[in-house]
Amino acid sequence: MFDKLKDMGKLMQQAKEMKAQMQKVQKELKTTIIDDEVPGIKIKMTGELEVTELNIDDNLLSDKKKLTKSLITVYNKAATKSKELATKQLSAISGGLNLPGM
């Protein structure tokens, strides 16, 4: 019985350490900048998908359809990079476990 309690204590300590490491990674993601671009548009966003900078070439401003498509494309490319980075960092901590909400 006492062995099970020791194991439970170890498991609780490991969970606490994992939570602290995940919080550290989440703080790092807030300040990590992801750059991407498509012809005529450059974007910068944090690892938490917050756009911090967007540069649009003046030539795109006259073609609303092309501008819209390019904005969607560049955002999705940067968001994918950001999500991949977060997944990589968090899975290193969790040992590859598929944790809900991560």
Image: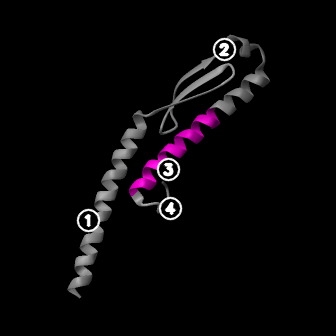
Cβ–Cβ under 8 Å for marks 1 and 4: no
Is 43 drawn above or below residue 24 in the view shown? above
Mark 2: secondary structure:
loop
Is 46 drawn above or below residue 59 in the view shown? below
Amino acid type at mark 3: Thr
Mark 4: secondary structure:
loop
Question: Alpha carbon of mark 2 to alpha carbon of mark 3: how far?
Answer: 32 Å
Q: Residue 92 is drawn in which quadrant? A: bottom left
Question: Alpha carbon of mark 4 to alpha carbon of mark 3: how far?
Answer: 10 Å
The residue singled out by tag 4 in the image is 98
Amino acid type at mark 2: Asp
Horizontal arrangement in the rendering, residue 27 relative to residue 83 (left or right): left
The residue singled out by tag 3 in the image is 87
Question: Alpha carbon of mark 1 to alpha carbon of mark 4: how far?
Answer: 20 Å
Is 100 drawn above or below residue 66 in the view shown? below
The residue singled out by tag 2 in the image is 57
Give the mark, 1 or 3, whose residue is nearer the N terminus: 1
Question: Alpha carbon of mark 1 to alpha carbon of mark 2: how far?
Answer: 52 Å
Q: Residue 69 is drawn in which quadrant? A: top right
Residue 90 painted magenta: yes
Cβ–Cβ under 8 Å for marks 1 and 3: no
Amino acid type at mark 4: Asn
Where does residue 39 sit, x and y in percent of width and height? 69, 22
Amino acid type at mark 1: Gln
Horizontal arrangement in the rendering, residue 20 relative to residue 60 (left or right): left
Residue for point 57% across, 26% down = 43
Q: Residue 16 is drawn in which quadrant? A: bottom left
Position of the N terminus by quadrant:
bottom left
Residue for point 28% across, 75% down = 8
Tell me the magenta residue range. Answer: 75-93
Mark 1: secondary structure:
helix
